[in-house]
Image (spheres, grey):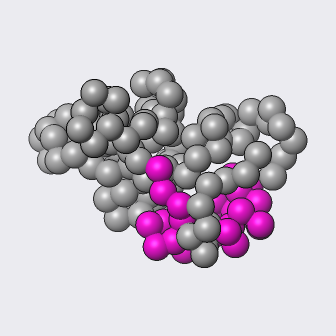
Amino acid sequence: MGAKGDSTLFGGTRGKPQGSLDLESGGGEGTTPKPTYAPSPKHDPKHPIGNPNPIKSQEEGQRLLDTGYHEGKQIYNITDDGKLVKFQPDGTPENGYHSYEVDGSPDVPASVLRRMRDDGKITEAEYKRFSKGKGKRRG
């Protein structure tokens, strides 16, 4: 992993969509619109579930979604605060995705964790910790 402040980390200038989702932005007939970050109302502190949103802004959410690692219908990335997040499609016509924080395996496929490690998004130690489902990213 690079030095602190390295703009290539956490989806900076280095990130690019991974995987096989159709990211056509035209939304024409027969194409899937580009995924759109849509925070879940469950992240509202006034909601009965009230889980905190690991993503701090609409801009951060969209950037992480755009530069995430695709596996099936899910997209994975690391927030600016170093949290591992999983984006889940909402099934809306706008192709909305909401996110939530995960601890690693089994919520994140091993192939995604390997790609994150190989791309320098996470260190070898973080890869091992996430592979074991051992929780939050450190520092």
Q: Position of residue 14 (x, y in %)?
A: 67, 41
Instruction: State the extent of the magenta-drawn residues as a range.
Output: 101-129
Q: Is residue 116 above or below residue 55?
A: below
Q: Residue furthest right?
A: 3
Answer left or right for 88 relative to 133.
Answer: left
Quarter of the image where one finds residue 124:
bottom right
Q: Residue at x 77, y 66 (%)?
A: 125
Task: Give the total number of marks visible in the rendering.
Answer: 0
- Comparing 25 with 106, the one in front is 106
Regarding residue 7, the answer to whether it shows in the image is: yes
Question: Which residue shows up at 81% across the image and 52% down it?
Answer: 1
Percent coordinates x, y for residue 130 in the rendering: 61, 66
Visible residue check, residue 39: no
In this rendering, the answer to whether 131 lies above or below 49 is below
Above or below, comparing residue 76 to residue 25 in the picture? below
Residue at image position (87%, 41%) is 3
The answer to if 70 sits in the magenta stretch is no
In the image, 7 versus 40, the foreground residue is: 40
Q: Is residue 94 left or right of residue 124?
A: left
Q: Is residue 113 magenta?
A: yes
Name the one closer to the observer, 48 or 108. 48
Q: Is residue 92 left or right of residue 125?
A: left
> At 47% across and 50% down in the image, what residue appears?
101
Q: Position of residue 115 (x, y in %)?
A: 62, 64
Residue 139 x, y percent position in the rendering? 76, 46
- Residue 79 versus residue 111 in the image, above or below: above
